[in-house]
Amino acid sequence: MKCFIFSVILFQFWCTSAFSKDSLNIINKKVSFGFAINPNRIVNAVIVHSTFNNSGGDKYDIDLVLKQFSTYGVSAHYVIGRDGKIYQLVDEKDNSYHAGKSRLPDGTTNVNSCSIGIELMTSYTESPTEQQLAALLILINQIKKRHPIKYVLRHSDIAPVRKTDPWNMNWDEFKNRLLDTKN
Ligand SMILES: [Zn+2]
């Protein structure tokens, strides 16, 4: 009997995880650097970035990217690989050090304290893949359900003098897709 109940629970779990709409498989890569606990945090912005490993070896290897982040003491909440895999580095309830000196359109300068940072693995010459864009769309739509998001911006929008990322991304097209998938 116990075994039967366990099987039913397991089946229900399998159903919800396999068939839930817009389900995302998020890979846990929580880091011990580049973030701060902030109990007063209210998230109202999503900032999209680009990154790759330029310290030798595979430029799109997640562990090498994290090693590089560790060297600089930076992070992001999420990194999306070329294949659309989503890695979570920092809990959404914590500040991640991704924005640096920057400014939101409403004048907020401590952007790390109110934003979620998402890194797309791209290089200076390559565009995001379709798998990355599809994963980014779903992830942002899910974040919007968890937080009162006012802005979805590029790093270059909030730090225009210092930053040019996300690189080689058709931002207007992406924003239109985001509007189309809004529910
Ligand atoms: Zn950036």
Image (spheres, grey):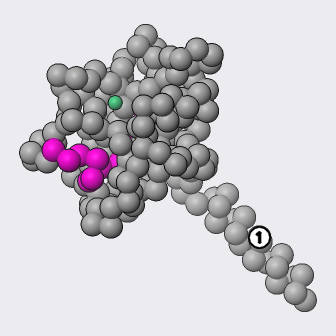
Q: Position of residue 61 (x, y in %)?
A: 61, 26
Q: How many marks?
A: 1
Q: Nearer the viewer, residue 55 or 86?
A: 55
**Residue 46, quarter of the rendered image:** top left
Q: How crowded is the residue under tag 1: few (<14 C-alpha within 10 Å), some, or many (20+)?
A: few
User: Label 1 amino acid?
Assistant: Phe
Task: State whether residue 178 appears in this view.
Answer: no
Image point (37%, 31%), residue name: 49
SS state under label 1: helix
Quadrant of the rendered image holding ligand 1: top left
- Which part of the image, by quadrant, shows the N terminus? bottom right
Task: State whether residue 16 appears in this view.
Answer: yes
Question: Is residue 31 located in the magenta-colored stretch of the structure?
Answer: no
Image point (29%, 57%), residue name: 43
Horizontal arrangement in the rendering, residue 16 relative to residue 137 (left or right) = right
Q: Position of residue 96 (x, y in %)?
A: 38, 47
Q: Position of residue 7 (x, y in %)?
A: 83, 75
Question: Is residue 117 located in the magenta-colored stretch of the structure?
Answer: yes
Horizontal arrangement in the rendering, residue 132 relative to residue 168 (left or right) = right
Q: Nearer the viewer, residue 136 or 74?
A: 74
Magenta range is 109-119
Vertical order, 160 against 35 (above or below): above
Image point (24%, 27%), residue name: 156
Vertical order, 151 against 5 (above or below): above
Q: Position of residue 81 (x, y in %)?
A: 55, 32
Q: Nearer the viewer, residue 84 or 8?
A: 84
Q: Residue furthest bottom?
A: 1
Find disc 1 in the rendering and name its residue: 11
Image point (49%, 23%), residue name: 52
